[in-house]
Amino acid sequence: MIATSFAHPALVDELDTFLVELNRAAAGAILPLFRGDHGLSNKFTIGFDPVTEADKGAERAIRALIAARYPHHGVIGEEYGEDRPDAEWVWVLDPVDGTRAFIAGLPLWTTLIGLRHEGRPVVGSIGQSFLGELYIGHAGGSRLMTPDGSRPLRVRPCPKLTDALIATTDPEGCFNGAERGAWTQVRAAARLARLGCDAYAYAMVAAGTMDLVIEAGLKSWDIDAAIPVIAGAGGIVTDWRGQDVGPHGGQVAIAGDRACLDEALVALSRAAT
């Protein structure tokens, strides 16, 4: 949850404006490579964990701006590791979340940029620059910015899991046996499920078009940025026990309605680690 002490309006406005700047810089590195020669390589010697020049270039661009503007801040990024991760202020970056979608030409990848204050996520953004969408959240609320303007974000009510539209990225590849069983139980109760949306599904919960996202094996850069966006829109982000997500990610549930989340947690808690 967002730290309640983080409420100075001038500071919120300053960081909000900076998030927009960071996303523009990331888009400048990413968009020329989308559906083009993106310089694909594999992080693994066994298996496949893709990374592209878009991932690397966007993170370099974001880090350069942070270093110039806030040299005392720390950074945790997927591509270039940690720099002062115990600082008072720490940026948490995933320059292209959903690289598999990116290399497939699907506009479901996002740029995730979050900021922790004293260990708690306080500001975050989910950017889909190909679609011209930027979802920003903090204690002052959440909003969607597009070329046509800006509008507030608000989750929708969905107290019953049987009415819910839910999502996960890849139940076969991301869940272990017990986790897959919990997902299957929740999926059987829900109205409709979508797969493969990565963090774009988180934005849809904040926008009020989806109700619940269930993930496991997340890293901090996969979820930190989304927590303020969801919270600012009135939603909830917890682990599979219903507690706050820890600093290293893990099993995560994102919901617009607490009652719907509580129903899902009945199954999820049995596979919680």
Image (cartoon, helix red, strand yellow):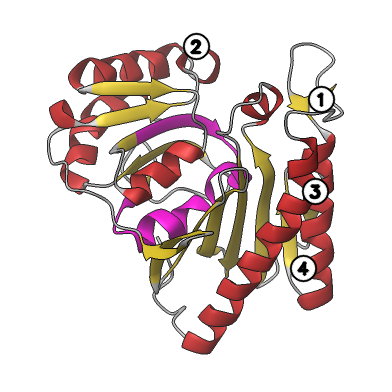
C-alpha span from label 3 to label 1: 20 Å
The residue to which callout 2 is attached is: 172
The amino acid type, in three-letter code, at marker 3 is Ala
Asked if the residue at tag 2 contacts the one at tag 1, i.e. Cβ–Cβ closer than 8 Å, the answer is no
Does 216 sit above or below residue 153?
above
Density class for disc 2 (Cα within 10 Å; few <14, some 14-19, many ≥20) is few
Q: Is residue 222 magenta?
A: yes
Which residue corresponds to the image point at 85% horizontal and 28% vertical from the top-left?
A: 37
Q: Earlier in the sequence, mark 3 or mark 4?
A: 3
Which residue corresponds to the image point at 17% horizontal and 47% vertical from the top-left?
A: 157
* Helix, strand or loop at mark 2: helix
Q: Quadrant of residue 138?
A: bottom left
The amino acid type, in three-letter code, at marker 4 is Ile
Q: Earlier in the sequence, mark 2 or mark 3?
A: 3
Density class for disc 4 (Cα within 10 Å; few <14, some 14-19, many ≥20) is some
Q: Is residue 267 magenta?
A: no
The amino acid type, in three-letter code, at marker 1 is Lys
The residue to which callout 4 is attached is: 66
The residue to which callout 3 is attached is: 29
* Helix, strand or loop at mark 1: loop
In the image, which disc is placed on residue 43?
Answer: 1
Left or right for 241, reference 130: left
